[in-house]
Amino acid sequence: MTTTLGTLDQRLRQKEMSAALCRFGKKYLVLSGKGGVGKTTLAANLAWLKAKAGHRVGLLDVDLHGPDIAGALYLPEAKVEVDDQGHLVPVKAAENLWVMTVQHLLERKQEAVMWRGPRKMRAIIQFIGETAWPQLDYFFIDSPPGTGDETLTVLKNIPDVKALVVSTGHAMALSDVAKAIDCLKACGTEAFGLIDNLSTLICPECGRETPLHGQGGAQELAGAAGIPFLGSLPMDPAASAAADRAGTPLAEAAPESQLALRLVELADRL
């Protein structure tokens, strides 16, 4: 009986998730295979830009052990509520932008999330199917490093999701990103394109752009994998500092910076 009830509960959850996904327009998974390449900042700014352009945007953080979306959007104190139907209510980060992250469910900011595979998979399904998302034009998903439970749960349950692959030019990053691309191919997921992030450093004093890590590696990887190369994004300390001062994503706080302008170009391609 327990097994039968558990199977029925799983089917109901899957049905609710499928119904929710039907209300979402374009779906993008931001992934890398490597940590520290700027996935979260990229996901937050792309979602913000699409929302500022008048689109209805959802942003889901499935990095359950190291969630940072709330920090990237300067919403550390926000909390998820529950509506009358028992559904989670995503935090409204801005006009047209709704966010769901485990960060907003924790009692303490530094509380560790110590979940294993099945619990993580159930949480992600709940964050999609048992959450009161509105009708959305875009749905962005920020993933953790690697190709583990969280990423595979998304790829398995959202067949029409497209991947935005993020890398740097560092050799170790390129190696891990190649594995992530292999995972996408094995799952039959379309790679929308590869982004070379943190490719140069823009000097806060003179504005000079200096190459980092070596050049061309990410573009070569994209070519070898047969996926589009979406261009390079710089590291811009001045724009990041402006975002920290304003408490808003850098695309909003430093709209004339080279980084923000290139992010706008990238967002327009989605």
Image (cartoon, rainbow, N blue to C red):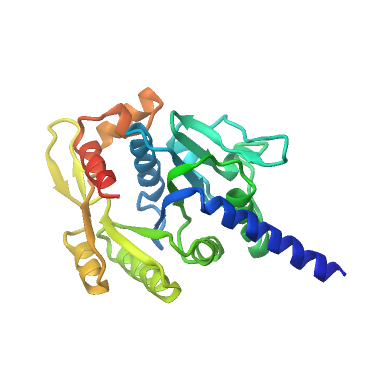
Along the viewing direction, whichever of 151 and 179 lies nearer the viewer: 151
Residue 63 shows in this picture: no
Q: Residue furthest right?
A: 1
Residue 65 is situated, as x and y percent measured from the top left of the image, at 57, 52
Q: Residue furthest bottom?
A: 186
Residue shown at 60% from the left, 49% from the top = 127
Residue 209 is situated, as x and y percent measured from the top left of the image, at 14, 43
Marks counted in the figure total 0
Above or below, comparing residue 94 to residue 186 in the picture = above
Residue shown at 48% from the left, 31% from the top = 93
Give the quadrant of the N terminus. Answer: bottom right
Residue 264 is situated, as x and y percent measured from the top left of the image, at 25, 40
Along the viewing direction, whichever of 108 and 60 lies nearer the viewer: 60
Residue 261 shows in this picture: yes
Residue 224 is situated, as x and y percent measured from the top left of the image, at 23, 74
- In the image, taking residue 182 as reference, residue 1 lies left or right, namely right
Along the viewing direction, whichever of 81 and 13 lies nearer the viewer: 13
Residue shown at 51% from the left, 39% from the top = 99
Q: Which quadrant of the figure has residue 54? A: top left
Above or below, comparing residue 225 to residue 266 in the picture = below
Along the viewing direction, whichever of 201 and 135 lies nearer the viewer: 135
- In the image, taking residue 215 as reference, residue 78 lies left or right, namely right
Residue shown at 38% from the left, 37% from the top = 55
Q: Residue furthest top?
A: 246
Above or below, comparing residue 205 to residue 146 in the picture = above
- In the image, taking residue 269 as reference, residue 73 lies left or right, namely right
Q: Which quadrant of the figure has residue 214? A: bottom left
Above or below, comparing residue 235 to residue 213 in the picture = above
Q: Which quadrant of the figure has residue 228? A: bottom left
